[in-house]
Image (spheres, rainbow, N blue to C red):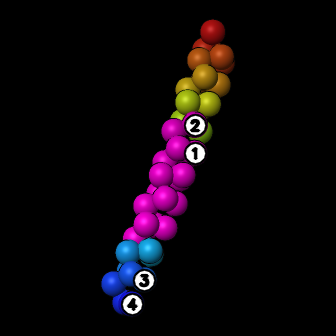
Amino acid sequence: MKKLKKRKIKKAIVRRGKLFDKQRTNDAWRNIFVQAGILK
């Protein structure tokens, strides 16, 4: 029972990490485009 719970928690953390990473890369790209627009 304990092992299963640990595995579930780990999976949840990984899933959340992936989501967070996706959002961060999107924000980074947006920042790059905004800066490029300002520089043009």
20 to 24, vertically: above or below = below
Rendered position, 20 above or below 9? above
Q: Do the residues labelled 2 and 3 touch (CB within 8 Å)?
A: no
In the rendered image, residue 23 lying in the magenta stretch gets the answer yes
Which of the labelled discs sits on residue 31, or is there none? none
Closer mark to the observer between disc 2 and disc 3: 3
Residue at horizontal 63 percent and vertical 9 percent from the top:
40
Magenta-drawn stretch, dominant element (helix, strand or loop): helix
Q: How many C-alpha atoms fall within 10 Å of the one at disc 3: few (<14), some, or many (≥20)?
A: few
Where is mark 1, residue-wise?
Answer: 23
Return the mark for residue 26.
2
Q: In which quarter of the image is the N terminus?
A: bottom left
Q: What element carries label 2?
A: helix
| 11 shown above or below 5 | above
Q: Is residue 22 left or right of residue 10?
A: right
CB within 8 Å, label 4 to label 3: yes
From what the image shows, is residue 38 above or below residue 21? above
The label number, if any, that marks residue 5 in the structure image: 3
Residues at discs 2 and 1 in contact (Cβ within 8 Å): yes
- Magenta range is 10-26
Number of other residues with Cα within 10 Å of mark 2, as a class: few under 14, some 14 to 19, many 20 or more: few
Circle 4 packing at 10 Å, graded few (<14), some (14-19), many (20+), is few
Q: Position of residue 13 (x, y in %)?
A: 46, 66
Measure the alpha-carbon separation of dots 4 and 1.
33 Å
Q: Which residue is drawn at 39% across and 81% down?
A: 4
Are the residues flagged by discs 4 and 2 in contact, CB closer than 8 Å? Answer: no
**Gap between marks 4 and 3 measured at Cα:** 6 Å
What label sits on residue 1 in the rendered view? 4
Q: Position of residue 9 (x, y in %)?
A: 44, 75
- What secondary structure is found at the residue carrying circle 4? loop
